[in-house]
Image (spheres, rainbow, N blue to C red):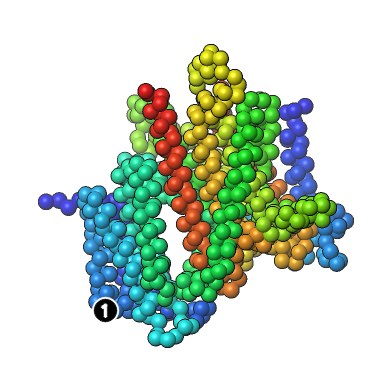
Amino acid sequence: MIIRFDKLGVVIAAIVAYAALAAPFATFRANRIVPGQARPILEALPPTLGMLLLAIVIAAAIVALLRTPLILRLAASAAALIALAVLIGIAGGFLTPAGNTFARVAPASGFWLLIFAFTLLLADVLSRLNLSPWARVGVLVLATLAIAVLLVSGSWNSLSILKEYASRADSFWAEASKHVTLALGSLAGAVIVGIPLGVLCHRVEKLRAGVLNVLDIIQTIPSIALFGLLIAPLGWVAVHVPGAAAVGIRGIGTAPAFVALFLYSLLPVVANTVVGLAGVPRAANDAARGMGMTDRQRLLDVEFPLAFPVILTGIRIVLVQNIGLATIAALIGGGGFGVFVFQGVGQTAMDLVLLGALPTVALAFAAAIILDAVIEMTATKRRVVETA
Amino acid sequence: MKAWLPALLRLAVLVLLVVFITSPGWFEPLLKPLTENGAPAVYNQGSLLTLTLQHLRTVLVATVAATIVAVALAILVTRPAGAEFLPLSRSLVNIGQTFPPVAVLALAVPAVGFGEKPTLIALFLYGLLPIFENALTALTTLPGNVMEAARGAGMTGWQRLMKVELPLSAPVILGGIRLSVVISLATATIGSTVAAKTLGEVIIAGLISNNLAFVLQGGLIVAALAVLIYNGLSAIERYAARRMGQGAE
């Protein structure tokens, strides 16, 4: 009998072998900023659990290495990820000396590599399964629930990132809501202004090149510079326009961040509206005109529904981009998760960096999955209508 | 007159940029109104020219590395031997693009420490994605009849890659490199928050000391660089597309 290897499995097994046997699983530090001591799996966990974790990851790596059915690969990757998530919390409790509140335990490179390897396996299985949009959102909801259960049950409380959270729980949620408000608010503004502007550009050809060129140039200005450059004009407005300061327009803070994100959002929205409307089949427009529809009816009942998936793609780009860019708002006092990232960088406290970076990545990732699913749903609906 | 106006504008921006970074002192009277309490109007904690060159070097090194790796990977997954990795690499690119550059930068610090290294890593990783995506799109959507003809002409796999596939994909791959460079120019400024020597230093010094003149000069230099490089690479891209007979119609 010939044993056949899975090519991706070889890569995964190699990463797992290195991560589980040679790399540290957790780091222990006497306080939050001193350099840590690395602990491999068997020293980071009680002996039985350490052996159990090794057995699970090695078994899962073997499943990945051989050509096994997809469902088995799915089970193996999920089991390994769950075991890692639960046991890193236990390692935190095990490594922290009783009653010591200064000691910090953080996941180390071995843990992150193992997570990466099995996420790779899971991503491969999911992309080969060709899941429907609803199923993909379902997987996202399940993963979110699993993480929420681990967070609420307190099994991660002994890890240093949650100790950072515990000491600033209030400001965490305040910054979280600022971050989401900035990202979603600027998106809403860009949709309200951008779609009509896109329609105008579609109808008036003379306008199109000019508007798109200006927006193109705005996109090339680095975010940190644009944030900075808006401080001056908004500061001037705040001083010289009566009432502006009262509604929150100031030189530094949320206002310039909001305006900058809004400006960045315009190009994808306007450009995709133009492309979407241009892609509406002539026949559909002719038929609508033949039926005696007015321009307005044609726009709302024919062109928009047909261009919708393309416009949504623009909105997806904007949302994911804004969630990431909103971190930079912290540099000009605009708040958001960036506050923790830059504080952490300033104090060389990497757990604090993670406290800001991980939620940002998670938000952007969730937004991408949800909007991709919605885009696919509207696109398939359109195909069904076309073939019917 | 429409045809030469953009070229003239670009030239003016370039001349202004070069004059500004070589002798910023000349512009002091222009920037002075933006400062308060007699603060310096022109960045005085280092030479703007050196910072600009360091900024460009960081971006160049990261982009060259990213281009080599991304194109090699795209070639690998479009050969029969690597076809198994194609669906996964697609979803990895999708996932990767949701990572904000700041997060990549900040997360690289614990691994390699402060300074230029985390910036290079962040620029490299973030620069990979657009190039890989474009290279993949280009290599998977080559016209079937051309590939058929190359095979019929008796070309080996290597010859097809070097003489047909890569030249035909060049304009789209260049488009990816252009996107990657513009993103990197911007992300490199954030590198200064982790002590990398880039133009971000000027902007951040301005933000910290509330000196708008610093913010403005740092921001404008980076913006001008980005616009000029973006335009330059677009021109190269159009040239490559014309040579491949794609932009003519």
Q: Secondary structure at mark 1?
A: helix
The percent position of residue A104, horizontal first and vertical second, equals: 46, 78
Determine whether A294 is above or below A164 in the image.
above
Residue positioned most to the top: A290
Relative to residue B12, is residue B136 drawn left or right?
left
Residue under the image location 25 percent in, 49 percent down = A70
Quarter the N terminus of chain B occupies = top right
Determine whether B165 is above or below A289 in the image.
below
Who is closer to the viewer here, B100 or B156?
B100
The percent position of residue B105, horizontal first and vertical second, equals: 54, 61
Determine whether A36 is above or below A339 in the image.
below
Q: Which residue is mark 1?
A: A47
* Residue B5 visible to the viewer: yes
The amino acid at mark 1 is Pro
Residue B74 is drawn in which quadrant? top left
Determine whether A46 is above or below A23 in the image.
below
Who is closer to the viewer here, A368 or A27?
A368
* Residue B119 visible to the viewer: no
Residue under the image location 44 percent in, 46 percent down = A370
Quarter the C terminus of chain B occupies = top right
The percent position of residue A235, horizontal first and vertical second, equals: 78, 56
Relative to residue B115, is residue B228 drawn left or right?
right
Residue under the image location 78 percent in, 41 percent down = B12
Relative to residue B82, is residue A308 drawn left or right?
right
Relative to residue B101, is residue B145 drawn left or right?
left
Residue B81 is drawn in which quadrant? top left
